Structure formats: C-alpha cells, structure tokens
Amino acid sequence: MRETHLLLLVCGVLACFTLSLVKAEDPYRFYTWTVTYGTIYPLGVPQQGILINGQFPGPRLDVVTNDNIILNLINKLDEPFLLTWNGIKQRKNSWQDGVLGTNCPIPPNSNYTYKFQTKDQIGTYTYFPSTLMHRTAGGFGGLNVYARSVIPVPYPRPAEDFTLLVGDWYKNNHKNLQQLLDSGNTLPFPDAILINGQAHSTFSGDQGKTYMFRISNVGHSTSFNFRIQGHTMKLVEVEGSHVIQGMYDSLDVHVGQSLSVLVTLNQAPKDYYIVASTRFTKQVLTATSVLHYSNSQSSVSGPLPAGPTYQIQWSMKQARTFRWNLTANAARPNPQGSFHYGKITPSKTIILANSAALINGKQRYAVNRVSYINPDTPLKLADYYNIPDVFSMDTIQANPTEGPAFYGSSVMPTSLHDFIEVVFQNNENTIQSWHLDGYDYWVVGYGRGQWTQASRNTYNLVDALTRHTAQVYPNSWTAILVSLDNQGMWNIRSAMWARQYLGQQLYLRVWTSTKSLANEYDIPSNAILCGKAVGRHA
Ligand SMILES: *[C@@H]1O[C@H](CO)[C@@H](O)[C@H](O)[C@H]1NC(C)=O
Ligand SMILES: *[C@@H]1O[C@H](CO)[C@@H](O)[C@H](O)[C@H]1NC(C)=O
C-alpha cells in the first residue's frame, strides 16, 4: 500500500516537473469574456442574440501552437452556459472540454476560468455554446491556431487571412426553438445562411496577391457548397491536416467542419461573388459575400457561379480527394506521414448507427437505440469521485441491435492506447455529421449502403487525413480509425445541433487503471461542482 502511494507520488512529481518545464516555454494568453443577450439584426429584423463582449459572432481567438489559454467566461444570461472548443484536443484535460458530460454548466451571474493548451495543434477551428440551443443565437466564433515560427508551413504566407463563419440561421429565438424540440417536434427549415453573422459582407484584397480563406460551417443542420466567382481555390488545410494542395472550383463543408484555401486574385479588377449554398436540401438557401479587388472598376455582376445541390456521389468523390501530404509537417517538425496508421490492426470495431426515433410520441434521435440524456452530474465528475448510479458502461452496445429506442446516458468503455475502428452507419435518408472531442481521427472510407467487413478493402490506409468531424452521406457509411492516446471522457455527437440536443450523442471513456499525471491532469481547483458532486472537493 505504502509503496503504491510512494510510486504515485514520484510519478506525480515527475509529471508535474515535466509539465512545468514545458509550460515555462509556452506563452500564456489571458482573456475575459462576458456573455450577454443583445439585439442583433442579421436578417434585417431584430432578434435576441447571444453576444460575447458585445460581439456577434464572438471575438476571434488567434493563438499559436502550444499557447496556454486562460479564459474567464462570465455568464450574464438567464440560463446556464458553457463554451466548447471545437477541435481543440484538450490533451489529458477533458476537464476543460466544456460539454455537459465533463463540466457543470456555469450558472447565471457566475463565471468559470478555462485553462487549456493548444498542444501540438495548428489549423482552423471554432468555439460555440454547447448548452441548450444557445448556439442558434450566437456565442460562436473563430479559433485559429497558427504554427510556431520555427515550424515551416507547406505554403507561402498569404497576404492576409480571412475567417469565414458560415452557417444556416433562424429568425426564431433560441428558447422558442428549444421549446419546439422539447415538445417533440423537429426544427423547421432554416431561414437563411449567414456569413460572419451577416447577410452581406465584403472581403478586400489586392490584385495579384494570394489570400487565405478559413471556412467553417457553424450552422445547425445543413451542409453547404462554397465557391468564388471566376476564381479557383487551393485547398491547404482541413481541421489541422496539411493536405495535398489540389485546386477546386467549389468545396463542400459539412456542419461542424473547417478548412482553409488559398485564393490568388488573378482576375480582372472588379468585384466577385462569394457563394455558399445549401447541399442535400429540397429548397436551396444561398448566401453571398463580395470579394473586392482594391483596384476594382465595377461591382458584382453576372449570374452566381453554379454549384452542386443534391449530387451525393459528387460530394463523396470530392471527400476522397482530401488526403494528407505525407511529407508536410503539421504542428511538429516530424512529417504527418511518419505515423503509419494503416499498418496498425485495430483492437476493436465499434459500429454506431443513428436513427430518428419516437419515444413516448416525441421526436428523439438515437445511437444504437440509445437516446442520450444528460445526467445532473457530469459523467467525468461521477467517474472521478466514484459516484454511483450516474451512468453505466453497458447501456450502449458496440454494434447496432434491433428494437425500440430508449433513454440513457451512454458511455462506451475503451482503454488508453487502444487503436480502434469506428463505423458510422447511416440508414436514414439525410446527411449526418459526426464529431469526436479530444481527438482527430483518420477518415479512411466512405461508401453507400451497409458497411460490411469487405468495405475495408476500399479504405485509404496510406494518406487519409485526420480531422475531428466527418460527414456520413444519406444511406451510407463512413469509417474512421482513432488512436486512443488521450485519457478522458470524450463526447461523440452529431454536429447537427437539434439531433445532438435530442439524443444523438454518447461518451467514449478512454481509461487506464494507472493513475498518473502523465496520462491525465487532476481536476482543476476551480471546477464547478453540481448534481451529486456538490460538496466534493475539487
Ligand atoms: C471567477 O472569476 C474570478 C476573478 O474575477 C476568479 O478569481 C475565479 O477563479 C473565477 N471562478 C472560476 C470558477 O473560475
Ligand atoms: C507537400 O508538402 C511539401 C513539404 O512541405 C511541399 O513542398 C509540397 O508542395 C506539398 N505537396 C503537395 C502536392 O501539396
């Protein structure tokens, strides 16, 4: 007993020591963000928005790989609130993930200071509210992680860098939308697509120069296709992966995803349309912005450039062209291709099938029949304090089964350092978008119909890219491989917010019985405690 304690102590001290050495080199960035309601007019009519420091969308976080972010979030709404950092891996630190399975929500007129590091990451990300339907009212923003100056990126530095938060939008208040869902309905079709919270925006540049467009889908339910009149786009980065730099006339971006392109202003000096239009929808919503040449002679004109609307095969084909540049480095100087993911045999296959199910006559969504509900005590806290009766690890099966859907707080058990295969099986006739917190993963295959073991023959085991959110086409499957190197309690969820809200989510418990700060940090001293964790010591 005593020996075990001593060992833990030594490990703890060593880990702390290493940690503080690393942290000493990495800069700290401090923020205070106040969340309030405010009137916004994105579609010309007043509506209640969620503002951060008075801004809609929220302030952009521009940080550098390995920065330490200390962000005090003050909640001035009349409802509990949390932000989650979409794509930030929170290494060893699911405590800071900002979802209800890991964090107690910040009560009204209260605050919580997030402390996390953008460890070994570069790329285009976002943050957004994870609570209720807050995301439909704002509170989201861009989160760009720039490479350290010592790490060359595989493209010339652009003249400027534009962040485009593109997403579907409702005129209706977030509480009304939530009320619709709570009473068993689905959401109506969105009213519009906004770019940076506006129906009209302009991006200006000089003829002959090259600009980066960081494009994220911050919407709730619809994929969009993005294009710029008269210009081609060179894809350079997808959620932190440096990709083969192909040229594209248009690109599909699904809910929760991000990518960056380089655009050279090599056309006649005028203004050009930037277009985002919905995909896989009967009615097509279109948003336009303007690409303005500083020496422009005339304003935008001509028809909007055409894009695909329902062509699934087109989109799947394009998705397969997104591949890792094996010789490019990411956040670290070792090339992306130095990790041979395709040579590792997965120790486990998990098949997750989504469904739209009625429970007690109300619309719900489920994964392998379980429609997730948030317990009052965050799963992570229940796990840490050994609080019983909050969740069980055999609620959800690792394969789809027959039968009616039911409520549950699903936690799927896995072991730290496992390498797993996850298949998202979509037997619904609508597109899906699946996100995993705490990780990026290799998207190795997309296919129509039912996944079978033979589908593995079609996997890209050489240069698939890693990302945090993958689309699953209607009546199709998407397969991913994940290296479980990040201990914690991690949310797997539909990025489509009404689906997430009504149960299409679960948690992956990545666990080892070895308690060590080298694997996972301690609970933060300022952790908010709620539910059955009230009174425990943080
Ligand atoms: C709330 O903010 C204060 C500083 O204004 C800080 O000392 C405190 O730690 C914050 N609370 C939490 C839970 O982070
Ligand atoms: C891959 O990355 C290398 C190294 O940074 C770069 O020189 C090369 O142009 C890239 N190749 C492609 C096809 O994008």
Image (tube, rainbow, N blue to C red):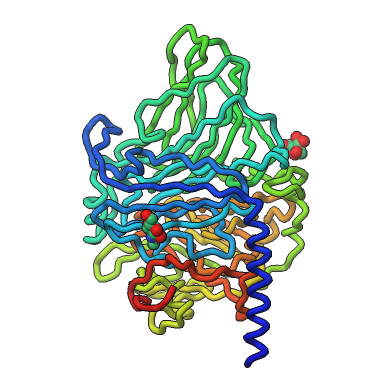
Kindly tell me whether residue 79 is visible in this rendering.
Answer: yes
Q: Is residue 80 above or below residue 52?
A: below
**What residue is shown at x 51% (from left), y 53% (from top)?**
472
Left or right of 491, for residue 407: left
**What residue is shown at x 35% (from left), y 44% (from top)?**
52
Left or right of 535, for residue 243: right
Q: From the top left corner, tell me how far across and down residue 112 is, in percent.
A: 39, 58
Q: From the top left corner, tell me how far across and down residue 107 is, in percent.
A: 30, 61
Residue 430 vs residue 176, the one in the foreground:
176
Kindly tell me whether residue 470 is visible in this rendering.
Answer: no
Q: From the top left corner, tell me how far across and down residue 266 is, in percent.
A: 61, 16
Q: Is residue 480 above or below residue 212?
A: below
Residue 428 vs residue 337, the one in the foreground:
337
Left or right of 175, for residue 310: right
**What residue is shown at x 76% (from left), y 62% (from top)?**
343
Quadrant in which the N terminus appears: bottom right
**What residue is shown at x 30% (from left), y 59% (from top)?**
80
